[in-house]
Amino acid sequence: MIEIVQKGKSRPEMVINMGPQHPSTHGVLRLEVTLDGELVTHVRPHIGYLHRCFEKYGESVGDYGMVTPFTDRMDYVSAMNQEHGYVIAMERLLDIEVPERVEYIRVIMAELQRIASHLLAVGTFGLDLGAFTPFLYVFTEREKILDIFEKSSGARLLYNYMCIGGLMRDVDDDFKKDTEEFVRTFRPKITELQNLLTYNSIFIKRTAHIGVLPPKVALNYAASGPVLRGSGVKWDLRKNNPYSIYDRFDFDIPVGEGEVGTLGDCWDRYIVRVLEMEESCKIIEQALEAMPDEGDVQQNVPKRVRTKPGEIYARTETPRGELGYYIISDTSAKPYRIKARAPSFVNLSLLPAISRGSLMSDLVAIVGSIDIVLGEVDR
Amino acid sequence: MTWLESLPLAVFVMIPLVIILIYALFAIWMERKVAGFIQDRLGPMRVGGWHGWAQSFADLLKLIQKEDIIPAEASKFLFRFAPFLMFAASYAAFAVIPFSSAYMGSNIDIGVFYLLAITSLLTISVIMAGWASNNKWSLLGAMRTAAQMVSYEVPTIMAVLSVIIVAGSLNLMTVTEMQSGNDTLGFLPNWLIFQNPFLLVAFVIFFISILAESHRVPFDLPESESELVAGFQTEYSGMRWAMFMLAEYADMLLLSLLGAVLFFGGWNSPFGGFMDGPIWGFFWFMFKGMILVFVMMWIRWTLPRYRVDQLMYLCWSILIPLSFINFVLIALWEMLF
Amino acid sequence: MVHSFKQGWQTLKSIFTGMGITIRHFFGPSVTLQYPDERDVLPKLARSKLFVNIDDCIGCNLCARACPVNCIDIETVKAGADVDLGKTSNGSQKRLWISRFVIDMAKCMYCDLCTYPCPTDCIYMVQEYEYSDFNRDNLVYKFSNLTPEKIAEVKETARIEAEEAEKKKAEEAAAKAARASKASDSRPSSVPGAARGIPGSAKGIPGKAKGIPGASKGVPGKAQGIPGAAKSIPGKAKGIPGAAKGVPGKAKSIPGTAKGVPGAAKSVPTAAKGVPGKAKGVPGAAKGVPGKAKSVPTAAKNVPGKAKSIPGTAKGVPGKAKSVPTSAKSVPGKAKSVPGTAKSVPGKAKGVPGKAKGVPGGGAAKVPGKSTAKQVPGKKPPKENKDNNTD
Ligand code: SF4
Ligand code: SF4
């Protein structure tokens, strides 16, 4: 019957495979978990089930512009941010000045996407802990964002909206109105989420003191994004190394404070996401206000991308952390090399370190709180 | 006795079965509707026309048609036997539930005792299913269930006993009968929950415990889908799985009905003599049971779930001491008044 | 004690808060859209399915080139000088018959990149989103509006026209080639530009590189395949395929045999066919697989009019090379033997240095005249055209 491994003289252990088809591994992650009863003694993540050769594709499709749709597909829940990072890298490589209006639209899109992505993250986090309903509430809100995206770009998930030097097309006429309306109705929903989930005592019991990631460990593992900020490290590229026009906005960087548990626990990582949504709302409001109403979004788009031999590394802050693109160009139409530094991948590497000694159920909470997207981990 | 002579008896015995089946179909549909409405959705809408009322029938038909899969390495006999044992245990317990003043399967004097004893069989069937599946997830789920059900039996029993002290009988029919009338504080029905402030506490303990006993959120660890895939049911499919489902819903109803008898006057009408009688009695009884079932669903679609150690902590460190204290207080109250 | 009571109270309070929220939603409105009965209004930009307004398409192929996943396949046939195909709605003159325009929606990733470059804006996204199917093949949408007969007809016309032009060129080229071959024996006599029916691509094998593309040369009036003698120079190997040319009346093209395959290279051209009037020898594709080389050209065919005989591509992959040219079509990027300029670059080419020894289409070097091209008078254009039919 069931095999129970007897290792040396220690207590009997059982190895189980969590995933790749498991409800809470957020895709096709496989965790090889060694259990002592329900106690996790060791976790080994196995990745690669969703590998789609992003980097190789990037080097073999026709030209630089054709890479954008593939960046979408890396982290498919925050496609706008992925595109944003790529076009910024390319614009720096080619020395392209982007029109004001384009910058504003990009920032608004990126922040909306950040909200959408965080909504998904907190929703599925709740789902992992058994709270089904908040998941659907946040999905309703996410739908509204996707509607805004669809109106402007034509797609709901993989937009291919930004292009090198500009945008594929101008935003929809209703864009400003829709976005304002969304931000207005969204704020009360955050409060509702806080009451329903964040401060629910069962939820707190399940997340406080669980999967504690001390700031030092986080830095050593090169964690980024909410995982790093959840440990109390105030590091956000939008502030620390502003790209695009982020230096013009006034917003805070929420960090974990160990409000209900230890600093750097699952709850802290979760609350950072919730608070960031609020900050994104602030940025969107300011951007909507300052955005020029007129302007050709295609005016600086190069007809053909011609590169000189060179290289660039550009990093941006996606909802999951620091996304970097390293591009080497030569004189041909295609990139010689594209490498993406995927935050999910780096953050996932923390998992064994912070889940040792926790319970099986906590492991689910920890995986949820790291908020990985397997598309990005495997690329 | 020829078979003809035993026919009335068979029909008599079958009555709860019919109730359970109809209720299960209804409750599954209702669960979906409640979930749907709570989540701003609509739930099933298509099968059968009005609000998809026939959805459960459609599902039942589907489940019947499904292939009966038994894992190659499973312990075949136990694997087949577990779902039936589970359902049998739930069903047998209905024998002592007074559905109305006119119907009760078996009017025995140790009704409550019998009921609590027979539902303990559920634990065995769950372990049986988990072990026989030869699946690690199932085993983990089964172990959790066993621990959980055995633990929560203690507070359940203490809460039930508190009521029994007040009622003075183990026969559920007697307990119900003594709750008729509408004299408490002049207008409230004579239900036990209004009789004694500590019974209110007992009810809270009882309700929490039956949530755990019937594996409902926040105590649905046995089949916590996001951790253990589906717990002890992982390897089951088709009708065998449906049996588990049926037993689970039957269990939920059973415990809710028990709550209705013990705290809310069973088949007694809330309006004294108005709308009274055996048929109305049945209606009121089921109505009260369904209200409790609804609350269980409502909770399910609101809360996250506890972790297994927290569940045990809640039981052994909070509920059990509390129920003992409460038990003593109720006894004192009864002596004083 | 007090602390635990406080905690208990907190727990209950938060539970009741939550239940309050959910019950409000219970009685609140739902957001469900009863899909098949009610439908969302899609924004006008929604990208759901590609559509091509074929009347406006000028066959410029820009959309196909813009697609990152190559799901658009366009084939065009030049219209005769005297045929007017009309103009597109924005006034550009159409010059090409679109004999094939298919989009494989199963491959498409809806990136919309194909719609931007179109000069006539005739490829665009439409809002139809319910086209899932049980069969992948049904997701291949065909847009060409020419009937198979029409396609055959226009192809024939184009062929004749092309042949006419070809003939002239060929004569010139042959004359030149003859001169060239006299000048130096070791040089292939094929004249780029005129090279037709070019036997497999030469591959250079560093160190031993020998691309010996046979060169069938037809001398007008006496066409004979004369195995050329391309040489690939290690390090710079360049196979120069000879030019097989059939001269009407006597065309003979001699399919080359692959040679220099250690072990057992064999090229068995089964059906080199000349097209009457202009016989073109299509050498089978040689595959030099050390030990296993097999080239089974099954149907090298010259397609008159477009005369392209594409000799299979020879690929010497040590141990596994197989070139099975089935239809004579050179697909750029795959066809490694580009008539007249076959080049094998050792190391990158298909020749695998050191071991690949397949010498594609070595002219008659060994078996000259063994499998000769056949003239099939009156033979219609090859079969592949059938695939191009569109509906
Ligand atoms: S939408 Fe993109 S993938 Fe689809 S055909 Fe056009 S370019 Fe190709
Ligand atoms: S880009 Fe437009 S005109 Fe050119 S081939 Fe494509 S559809 Fe036809």
Image: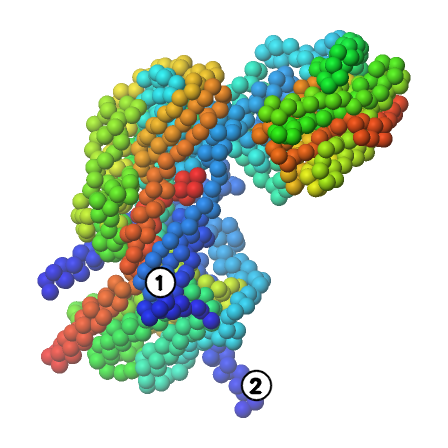
Q: Which quadrant would the N terminus of chain B be assigned to in this image?
A: bottom right
Q: Residue at x 21, y 40 (%)?
A: A233
Q: Residue A306: where, in percent of width, then height?
A: 46, 17
Mark sitting on residue B278: none
Q: Which residue is mark 2?
A: B4
Q: For residue A35, which numbered disc appears in the image? A: 1
Where's residue C180, x and y in %?
75, 12
In this view of the protein, which residue sits in the foreground, A178 or A351? A351
Residue B93, by quadrant, is bottom left
Where does the image place residue A184, in percent across and percent down from the top left?
28, 32
* Neighbourhood count class around disc 2 (C-alpha, 10 Å): few under 14, some 14–19, many 20 upward: few
Residue drawn at 44 percent across, 29 percent down = A337
Decide if residue A96 is on the left or right side of residue C270.
left
Q: From what the image shows, is residue A273 above or below residue C7? A: above
* Image quadrant where residue C345 sits: top right
Residue density around tag 1, few if under 14, some if 14–19, many if 20 or more, within 10 Å? many
In front of the other: B332 or C362: C362
Decide if residue A345 is on the left or right side of residue A194: right
Q: Are dots 2 and 1 on a single chain?
A: no
